[in-house]
Image: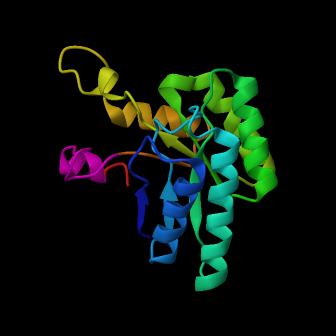
Amino acid sequence: LLGCTIKPKLGLSAKNYGRAVYECLRGGLDFTKDDENVNSQPFMRWRDRFLFCAEALYKAQAETGEIKGHYLNATAGTCEEMMKRAIFARELGVPIVMHDYLTGGFTANTSLAHYCRDNGLLLHIHRAMHAVIDRQKNHGMHFRVLAKALRLSGGDHIHAGTVVGKLEGEREITLGFV
């Protein structure tokens, strides 16, 4: 599987964002995902983004004959709003939603996980702001502990980082999450 996070993370209209999703999926990627900062800004409201991304997903699947995916960021300021987004994603037939567990919280994560499990959606857990907890040498907890807690709270898969690049972690530790 090969995927990417759509960039630039901010500034595109929903239509242009959907076009970027389509071009990535049509160009050979298996999945794309929203950046954690992509939520519901005045220039790209979440509902419009969901619609254009679903259209891009189905168009790329029809043209390639391959199964594709896009992780729609359902994180919101309240559990009710987050659930509204997940319900809309399911109505569109999109297979995966994403949640930022630190900005949304563990209880919200579990609520969303129950909904996803009951309705055939996958739940991707993003680790935005994780370094506040797990990259500190004198306090906090290891990411492996966070990852296990997130799996126990219902996440289907977790953004665990890579062994190279911006999200770099120690090779042995990162491979332990895979």
Please tell me whether the stretch drawn in magenta is mainly helix, strand or loop.
loop
* On-image quarter of the N terminus: bottom left
Is residue 108 in view from this perspective?
Answer: yes
Viewer-side residue, 147 vs 37: 37
Q: Picture quarter containing residue 62?
A: bottom right
Is residue 95 in view from this perspective?
Answer: no
Q: Is residue 109 above or below residue 26?
A: above
Please give the name of the residue rendered at 38% of the width and 48% of the height, measured from the top-left corner: 8
* On-image quarter of the C terminus: bottom left
Residues shaded magenta:
161-175
Residue 2 position in % (x across, y down): 41, 68
Q: Picture quarter containing residue 154?
A: top right
Please give the name of the residue rendered at 58% of the width and 63% of the height, measured from the top-left corner: 69
Residue 111 position in % (x across, y down): 71, 30
Q: Picture quarter containing residue 18?
A: bottom right
User: Which colouring convention does the figure follow?
Assistant: rainbow
Q: Answer with left or right where residue 137 lies relative to residue 90.
A: left
| Residue furthest top as drawn | 139
Residue 100 position in % (x across, y down): 51, 33
Q: Is residue 18 above or below residue 173?
A: below
Q: Is residue 164 magenta?
A: yes
Residue 166 position in % (x across, y down): 23, 45
Report the number of discs: 0
Please give the name of the residue rendered at 67% of the width and 60% of the height, measured from the top-left corner: 54
Q: Answer with left or right where residue 57 lies relative to residue 118.
A: left
